[in-house]
Image (cartoon, grey):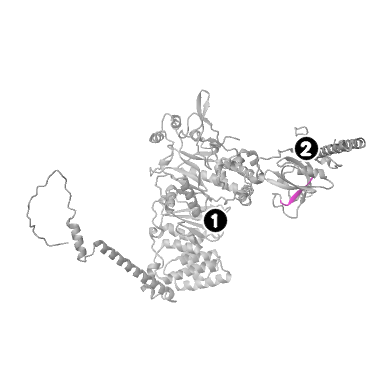
Amino acid sequence: MSMYQVKSISGDTKIDLPTCMYKLPNVHASRSGSGEHAHQNGEVDPAVRALEARQDEIMQRLYELKAAVEGLAKTVTTPDADLDATTLPQQGNARTVLTGTADLDSLLGKDPGALRDIVINAHPSRPPLSLLVLHSLLCQRYRVLSTVHVHSSIPAVPPELLTCLGPRHTHSFARQHFQLGFTLIWKDVPKTQMKFTVQKMCPVEGEGNVARFLFSLLAPGPCDAASATLSDSWVDTALFQLSEGGAKERAVVLRALNAALGRSPWLAGPELSLADIVCACCVHQSGSAPSAPPNVQRWLKSCENLGHFGQAYTLLH
Amino acid sequence: MTNEEIKGAVAEEDQAQSKKGLKKQQKEAEKAAKKAEKQAKLAAEQHGVEEEDFAKDRYGVPPMVQSTEKLDRALVRVQDLTPEKAEQLVWVRARVHTSRAKGKQCFLVLRQQQFNVQALVAVGDRASKQMVKFAANIPKESIVDVEGVVRKVEQKIESCTQQDVELHIERVFVISQAEPRLPLQLEDAVRPEGEGDEEGRATVNQDTRLDNRVIDLRTTTSQAIFRLQSGVCQLFRDTLINKGFVEIQTPKIISAASEGGANVFTVSYFKTSAYLAQSPQLYKQMCICADFDKVFCVGPVFRAEDSNTHRHLTEFVGLDIEMAFNYHYHEVIESITDTMVQIFKGLRDRFQTEIQMVNKQYPSEPFKFLEPTLRLEYTEGVAMLRAAGVEMGDEDDLSTPNEKLLGRLVKEKYDTDFYVLDKYPLAVRPFYTMPDPIDPMYSNSYDMFMRGEEILSGAQRVHDAQLLTERAMHHNIDLEKIKSYIDSFRYGAPPHGGGGIGLERVTMLYLGLHNVRQTSMFPRDPKRLTP
């Protein structure tokens, strides 16, 4: 605070102070005086001002959040907003929500000093082939410690199920060297199940949902809602109609696949997506690969050429 | 003897009536009545015959079996009494578990070890009224020989293990009579915890059981526990012998404490004193240095720990393993965990009836495990505990509650009751533990857990005399006292590791019991030295 100065009236008169006592600073120093002064002048204490600024900032963020939520609500409530692919890229809000990052720290939470272990429980009679393909893709991307166990609820499993995650890593003795753990447990479970952080996360059930989780570790999700939905719906179609459906349903799905693959080399978007992985595995698992229509055949071949389906296909009988 | 005497008394009375006065007659009558009553009572007690007893030689107490004769009579096991044996006449030797007389018939439950069958003595052309009475009065827990016909029953007998048949007794002989008052009732001893409280029925407390262990051991629960325990031991031996291990015997009287010195029992040894072995550790390692490659031993281990907990005993059976490995101590972990898994599998497949029997009294979830066994590292365990809100340092040992909690967390995620925690901090392990090659804060050591309780503690041992001396000095251990231990590594020693488990603890945790005294036949703890 700059003030004007007045010359000292008294001048430099030295007062001889006795030395038999100690000195204390003046308690009525100019500091308290200036404080009072400031208040009287209606000036704001910097602390208060900072508080106001923070409040403003919070309110601003709340408004932004409100706007974001409203934007989202609009895309959800408008029936064809998510189908209109041309307008979507402008929908900035929707895009940020769907775009994941492939950074393990931000995806799985910072947890230094311990292996992040993904546990997958699956029944040996229904091996989750798509997860094995995803495992192979994860291995390409990260240092993955893969282990296979048999739970005591299963008397015995065929040997190929024990080696389905490939040969043991030469450094598997040091768990800390890995970025990600992939623990597959053959267990008597009604549905394929995934557990990660047991305190914060409930188990993820169903092969499709586990596949979605694993795929999100690999690639940022499709950048627009349309292809995300397309991919999602193919995953569900594959699992509910190809794997569990009857012959008629399978035929319908195969025709739909054939049509879709006639238009584009991959099911959702310009490159391999989760939809391709899950659908290809389900086509094989349901035994309809040999009799599949030509586009599907060609697409299965291109999937196989990627080299990640090998381990999974060894489990097909 | 009774019939004649009664007749005599009646004749005397007649005479007296004619001669004496009314008063005397009355007195005499009273006396006679008393006498008759007494005799009748005596007769009843001795199961005597007031009337003609046509079945006299079909029951009774034969002279003590002193090996006077060698009968060729085949005795059928109670567990073999199945519908296939229907309508056959068989001999059975069993204990009277319960007996219940009901008018002209008497139901007995005959028990043989953990099996029991309902038997029936009914008045008919084979059994007389007196025989039924005799059968009804046999004290519980007496050993009897019975001959009877196996009959199918229409309705299943829920209270017995042989539910489809019953035995219609034609002869019954008491081989060894039990005292009529039992220190504890078997039904009370097998009553599930909690159930007795609700219905106001008795349960037997631990000390009463242990004081009368012979009777307590007869219960189906105890029978099942110790049969299963024998199975653990056998599976342990079989598995290891298949893996090429050699069983060794180690001395139990030793000159120096093998681990520390605080918790050893001192025994007088002629003019000096000696100790009871706390673990066969030193001798196992010496066998490795003597080129036995892979050894195991089964024997008593003594710990003078004054801890009165549910899981500590002062004497228990140790199942110890030590083996030389090629390149990495995980070879040892794999051997040990595979042995454990083989034991669990063997128990699951071969002892299901025993497990069910124990579960009836002490319900617990079935034991779950993974094959191959889950191996987590200490840091992971610490991270899991921290995520659950436990505050602990990197180098802190796990406290018992934290061990339990970690067991629950691991169970939640991996659904296994058995796992290995590897790479413990060096600071919390004994001096002979091999340090980690990369991070000197950690060590090549591991603990194994069952249902969240530690059952095995093991490590790669230091097999180099020089390093061992350094480590011992670091722990301020008097080198003179462990000289012979260090010396055994001076003449070349293969890299090796091992560990030991407590038989009682493994049985307890496998069955989900809550006290190690239940799985020790004659437990020894700071407060109990008998029976």
In terms of depth relative to the viewer, which is nearer, B271 or A21?
Answer: A21
Local crowd size for mark 2, using a 10 Å CA cut-off: few (<14), some (14–19), many (≥20)? few
Residue B61 is marked as: 2
Give the CA separation, mark 2 to mark 1.
59 Å
At which x and y percent is residue A37?
A: 19, 62
Q: Is residue B434 left or right of residue B233?
A: left
Rendering coords of residue B157 (x, y %): 72, 52
Disc 2 element:
loop
Within 10 angstroms of label 1, few (less than 14), some, or many (20 or more) residues? many
Does the image show residue B108?
Answer: no
- Mark number, residue B240: none
**Residue A247 located left or right of residue A84:** right
Q: Give the magenta part as a residue range.
A: B163-169
Kind of element beneath mark 1 = loop
Amino acid at circle 2: Val
Q: Along the line of sight, which residue is nearer the eye, B10 or B184?
A: B10
Relative height, residue A163 to residue B148 (above, below): below
Q: Which residue is most to the right?
A: B18
The residue that label 1 is drawn on is A187
Residue lying at 78% horizontally and 37% vertically, measured from the top left: B61
Count of numbered labels shown in the rendering: 2
Along the horizontal axis of the image, is B30 left or right of B524? right
Up the image or down, B485 lies above or below B99; here it is above
Q: Measured from the top left, where is residue B268 in percent x and y?
A: 52, 26
| 2 or 1: mark nearer the eye | 2
**Relative height, residue B189 to residue A117 (above, below):** above
Identity, as a three-letter code, of the amino acid under mark 1: Lys
Q: Main secondary structure of the magenta part?
A: strand
Label 1 chain ID: A
Disc 2 chain ID? B
